[in-house]
Structure formats: structure tokens, C-alpha cells
Amino acid sequence: MTEIITPPLDMSAEDYLKYADEIARFIADYLSHPEAVSVLPNIAPGSISAALPQAPPKRPESMDAILADFKSILMPGMTHWNNPGFMAYFANSSPGPGILAETLSAALNQNAMLWRTSPAATELEETVLKWMAQLLGLNEMTGVITDTASISSLLAMSAAREAIPGLNLREEGLAGRPEVPRLRIYTSEQAHSSIEKGAIALGIGQRGVRKIGVDTDFRMRPDLLESAIAEDRAAGWLPFCAVATAGTTSTTSIDPVRAIGEICRREGIWLHVDAAYGGSAAIAPEFHWVLDGCDLADSLVVNPHKWLFTPMDCSVLFVKSPSTLRRAFSLIPEYLVTHGDATNYMDWGVQLGRRFRALKLWMVIRYFGQEGLAALIREHVRLAADFAEWVDSCLEFERTAPAPLSAVCFRAVAEPDASEERIQHVNQQLMDSLNRTGEIFLSHTKLNGRYTLRVAIGNIRTTQTHADRLKALLLEHLPEALRI
Ligand SMILES: Cc1ncc(COP(=O)(O)O)c(C=O)c1O
């Protein structure tokens, strides 16, 4: 006879308080000593999954057992983005107000797909994005929150494709239509890979993305963009979108958006600006210039989860014409039909269900205020400038790119006459050796084929002490890197 199992009840209020208290204490302790845990875990691939049961539990398990495994198996496998020594990629942060907002968001389990499935989440999203537009000087634009810049840019490119007149791509698609010319997107050699990925997803293909050359400071060259468009038109391509970057991933270079925008206007093509990292700088009045020319953009992405101190994940897509974005995506089956003219964010992208991400952005902006956020950005740029100056003053190191914002590209110079291969080897050794200390996490890139280390300041807890420690570790570990 089959055993009848009584359906379990959710956690009692008493237990909830007990474990919430335990977790809150764990978080408070973790965040008051973010350096106490190694920034990179010292583990081999596969070791975490080997320590986890390979089959799901049949019977309920106690929260004590679950939390014990969290601490003993998962914690040692974390890369600590909250460690102030995290200076790889673009650092990000999860400050207190963001963490608390995420807790509330999980508890209230809001789904901002339709206005009526969460009026508060929908209207807070509208309001906080109006604030963001004011903070960044993008007053002609309207925003929507997505998970990542990759998805925001994909949506922007979809709207750009929808805006092409006369092709009826939404209904007819691209394949099997000999009357439709090949579509072309333009972006710089330094653009993020998400632009190319978006083109792949949209059926434009990697060959449909033309990479425009950059100047000596890694900024897109408008003259080359203009000649590429003319050449493509002559060869039968259909140029429809250009993507400029305000804060490129490797060097934080800022493309001349105004000049690019003027070309786009003349050519009748959509301008999308990838300001995923750099856009946040415009919160400080002295960095408004980073978004100069963005009044000419049709869309722009900025990631509060990069340099606006908001926990993963939170990306904001701004568009000048929300109706074009909605035209690309709005599809309302009978079961989702509602009446009234409220915003239904499901019409603004691919996904139906949407997390209540506006809550954390709202709490972070309120908690720090425009001046607090600007002060953090300003300090990070100062720390990067100080580090760049130190590199310039050291015979052992050289800079490989200008540092206009909070990341610095540099490398050890190795021996006189060292080959590029040897310089790469030394710098790889140096980076690996620093990353093994558990105090610092650096990443790398290549610029004009030259291997380059990168320091990206962006974590809310990174201070001069951590930047100075990085300098000391570089000098301490260099002799060994040169010996190997
Ligand atoms: C300039 C730029 N754009 C886009 C992205 C992709 O960001 P996400 O991880 O939010 O998709 C990055 C990531 O670092 C980036 O630097």
C-alpha cells in the first residue's frame, strides 16, 4: 500500500524569525569583514558538485542541515565580488539597502508583468526610471528594467530592426526572403561581445556586425563609420543600427557619441549607446560629459548592477520611442488582456514574468542620494587616477591605455628587448600569483595584440588602503614572475 504523505506546511513564523535572525547575523558579520574571505576560492572545478548529493532529497530536511551545508560546501566555492580586493572585470557591490530590498522582493513575490499583477512594482519602476533619467540627464527617454546589459542591448537592437520601414520583419521574419537585403549593425572593435551575440540571436549573424576601427585612445572613428556605411550601401547591405560605447570593457574609452549620432541621423539609422558601465558616472556633474551626444541616441543601456551599487541583477534600457519597442514585442493573448491605459511591462520585451527589481534600485538611490552616489563615483575615479600615476612613476610597469574613468590598463615591462610572448608570460604569472593571494582579483585583456592587466575599481568597499595594498603586492610578486 502506498504511504500517504501529509503535504508539508511552509515554515512557521517562529522558525522564520529564528533563521532570518541567523542569516541576518551571518550577513552582518560577512559584510563587516568582507576581506576576511579569499576573493577567489582555492578549489578545483567539480569539487563543489562532488560534495553535493547527486539525487534530490525524498524527505523534508531541516533548515539547520541546509544552512550547515550552505556554510561548509557552498561558502568555500564563492568568488567574493563583495571583497574590496575584487578589481577584475567591472567590480560591483551589494550594499545593505540593496540586500534588504531583495529580501522584501522575495518575500512579497511580486510579478511586474501586467500593471494589475503588481501596480506598486509597475509604478515604482516607472518612477525610479524617471529619477534615473533625471540623474543621468536623459530626460527625453523612458526606461524599462531588465536583468543584464546583454538583454537590454538585444531589446534595443530588436527595436532598431522593427524601425526599418517597409520590411514587415515582425510578421514575415528574415529567412527565405530574397527581396530583403542583408542587414548591417556597426560597432567598434572595442565593443562588448553582447552586441555580436544580440546580432546572432536576431538572425543578423556575426557577418552582419561590422566592426569599426578605433583611434589611439580606443574610441570609434566616426570617419571610418561613415565610409563603412557608404561602402555597404553601395554593395547592397542595409545599414540599420550603430552601437556606440560609453565606457568600453577593456579600457573604459568613450566613443564620440555626438559625431556618431550625427552620422546616424543623416543616414537614418538607429543609435544605441552601450553605457552599461560608464553611464553611471554621469550622476556626478563633472562626469556628465561621458554621456555627451546621448540626446541623439534612440536607446541607451546603463547597468545599476555595475557602478551604481545595486546588487545583481539590474540593467536599465532607455528608449526614446517606447512605442517602437512595444511594436517589436507586444503580443497579448486573450488570457492576458486587461483594460485601461496603465503600463504593462510584459509589452516591453521578451519575458512575461518580471522580478521586482525596481525596489532595490529605489532603495539604493534613496539611501545614498544623488550626492552620495556621485561621491562614490568620484572617489573611484580618484583611486584609479592615483593608481595610474603610480604606474607611470614605476620603472617596472607601463600603462597601455588612457584611464578616463575607474579602470587602469597596465603591464609589467619585463626585460629590455623582451618579446611580446615573454611579456605576456611574465604578466600572466604576475596576475596568477596575485590572484592566488586571495587578497586581490585582477583580470586581463589584449590591446592591439598586447597582453594587458586591468584594475577596475567599482566596489563600494574599495578604499585607498586596498589600492595601496595592490601596489605593494605587485612589487612584491614581480621578481618571482620575472624568474619563472
Ligand atoms: C560595456 C559593456 N557592455 C555590456 C556588458 C554586459 O553586461 P551584462 O553582464 O549585464 O550583460 C558589459 C560587461 O562587462 C560591458 O562592460
Image (tube, grey):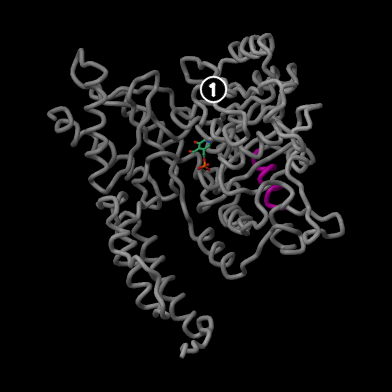
Residue extending farthest to the front is 1
Task: Give the magenta-colored segment's residue range.
Answer: 127-136
- Left or right, 382 with respect to 279, comes to left
Q: Nearer the viewer, residue 306 or 160?
A: 160
Tell me if residue 454 is in the magenta stretch: no
Tell me if residue 134 is in the magenta stretch: yes
Please state which amino acid type lies under the numbered disc 1: Ser
Q: Residue 192, how many percent across, how many down?
A: 51, 32
Could you say whether the residue bearing mark 1 is in a helix, strand or loop?
A: strand
Residue extending farthest to the left is 483
At horizontal 50% and vertical 22% (from top left) the residue drawn is 189
Q: Is residue 236 above or below residue 382?
A: above
Q: Nearer the viewer, residue 206 or 31?
A: 206
At horizontal 61% and vertical 37% (from top left) the residue drawn is 153
* Res 47 quadrant in image: bottom left
- Left or right, 268 with respect to 415, comes to right
Q: Residue 415, how many percent across, how many down?
A: 18, 18
Q: Quadrant of the C terminus?
A: top left
* Residue at mark 1: C-beta within 8 A of ligand 1: no
Q: Residue 468, how many percent across, how many down?
A: 30, 40
- Left or right, 352 with respect to 368, comes to right
* Res 471 quadrant in image: top left
Q: Residue 368, how many percent across, how many down?
A: 56, 53
Check disc 1 and report the residue beneath it: 188
- Left or right, 315 with respect to 234, comes to left
Q: Residues within 10 Å of mark 1 (few under 14, many from 20)?
A: many
* Res 246 quadrant in image: top right
